[in-house]
Image (cartoon, rainbow, N blue to C red):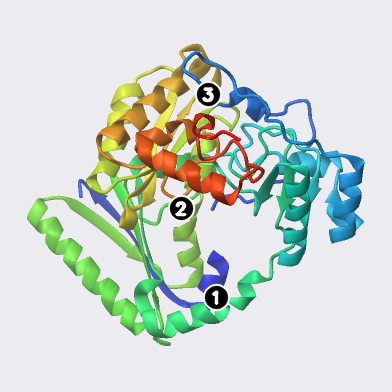
Amino acid sequence: LSQTLRSIAPNRRGVLVAAAAVKLSTSSTLRLSSNLPPLASSLYPPISADGRSLSRSSYSRIEPADLLVFADIIGQNHVITDPFEVLAANTDWPRDCRGQGGHVLRPGCAEEVSAILRHCQKRRIAVVPQGGNTGLAGGGVPVFDELVLSLSRMNRVLESVLHLFSAARSTLAETLSAFEVMDAATMSAVSDNLKLNCPLSGSSEFYALVETASCDASGSNDAGKLDKFLECLVSLNHESAGSIDAVISNDSRQFGAIWALRERAFEALVADCGPAGGYMQFDAAVSDRLDMQRLVLATRAEFGQLDCVIRVAGFGHLGDGNLHLVVTADPAGAAACGLWPRVEAFVYGWLARRRGSISAEHGLGWKRSAYLGHCKSPTAVSVMAGIKRLLDPQGILNPYKVLPPSALSY
């Protein structure tokens, strides 16, 4: 999608700003090996105060007769049972847990999806819809043996809405833009682990990536706006006695190099220690933009001095107050001191006190469902559960996700 947007808004200008006091890999292919991530069901948070573990609900198991029905709907070639392909569908991008699903269906149109779901509703077979399988919260992979409904073949939908983006380009001008921030710890990870060079000299406490997309064929409108923006920063800098450095991209190559610093930030942080138990990431939303920095500093003060902790870093979208907080640590040391439950309780408790949200864009999946009460009242959770039961009376669609199991009963 980002590549498509860039192709229809070619006159995009970016500026990277460093200030003091002021691309994810999408591959989901896994190799079968003995070093498999742990089962999602074994990592699922306790579902009661006495520590009771989640158990599989009484959904029907997939039988050979069901596979014949599915093959009749979508064709035998799109009913996947190969262990290699099925394993890839059971694990999302972090590869820190896996489901136990044994079957993947790949419909090619909405009518086939509808027919599959009618059969699953009739048989009470649990289904997990799956898009690009690049999720980070376990929302698009099974917890137990749910049927994976992959939408990978349904990749022509975008073509029908491209004309809307073209119309937007001619009327909305700079609306297609970005304002991203990274702290020094994030930039250090990008430099240390990915060997990507920042075009700015020296080091700074914060980095901001500002992008505009213009419908002006010459791009001169954007250039003038960026010049004004930098003039404003210089003026603020003189008033606050801070320090500011900046660079404006002059061509698509430099533009891509600047964006790579931000797009590959999470990849760089995970490289600190590998994905197997060596990091925890949060997708927080705050109304006060200064809380983005406050949460990083508070987390760093609480855990940064522990021997097992490698880095506490923050980056995200300044415009909507979306912070990606990442803590990386030595896996063995983190397990020995019970680091991850402590970090999770600290961050979600901090957000609850500041009336923030535990997820801005990554979703709740099953990894955050137990913490829904930190940002939603019991009444709100009850209403959400009522809507779920109304629309999905048998609870077959993506079970064990978003709402805590205690909120639902089928």
Q: Is residue 53 left or right of residue 114?
A: left
Q: Residue at x 68, y 71 (%)?
A: 156
Labelled disc at residue 298: none
Whichever of callouts 1 and 2 sits on the residue coming sooner in the sequence is 1
Residue at image point 49% right, 33% down: 407
Task: Say few, some or many: other residues with alpha carbon within 10 Å of mark 3 (under 14 / 14 to 19 / 20 or more).
Answer: some
Q: Are marks 1 and 3 in contact (CB under 8 Å)?
A: no
Mark 1: few, some, or many residues within 10 Å (few <14, many ≥20)? few
In the displayed structure, would residue 203 be above or below residue 52? Answer: below
Label 3 belongs to which residue? 47
Give the image location of residue 182, x and y in percent: 36, 48
Between circles 2 and 3, the one closer to the viewer is 3
Q: Secondary structure at mark 2?
A: helix
Instruction: Identify the amino acid type marked 2.
Output: Leu
Q: Which residue is mark 1?
A: 7
- Of the numbered discs 2 and 3, the one sitting upstream in the chain is 3
Secondary structure at badge 1 equals helix
Q: Where's the C terminus, which quadrant?
A: top right
Q: Nearer the viewer, residue 349 or 97?
A: 349
Q: Residue at x 31, y 47 (%)?
A: 202
Residue drawn at x 28%, y 25% is 301
Between circles 1 and 3, the one closer to the viewer is: 3
Q: Is residue 387 visible?
A: yes
Q: Is residue 190 visible?
A: no
Q: Earlier in the sequence, mark 1 or mark 3?
A: 1
Identity, as a three-letter code, of the amino acid under mark 1: Ser
Front position in the image: 102 or 17: 102
Residue that mark 2 sits on: 261
Amino acid bearing label 3: Ile
Q: Between residue 317 and residue 61, name the one nearer to us.
A: 61
Is residue 8 found left or right of 297 in the rendered image?
right
The CA span between labels 1 and 3 is 47 Å
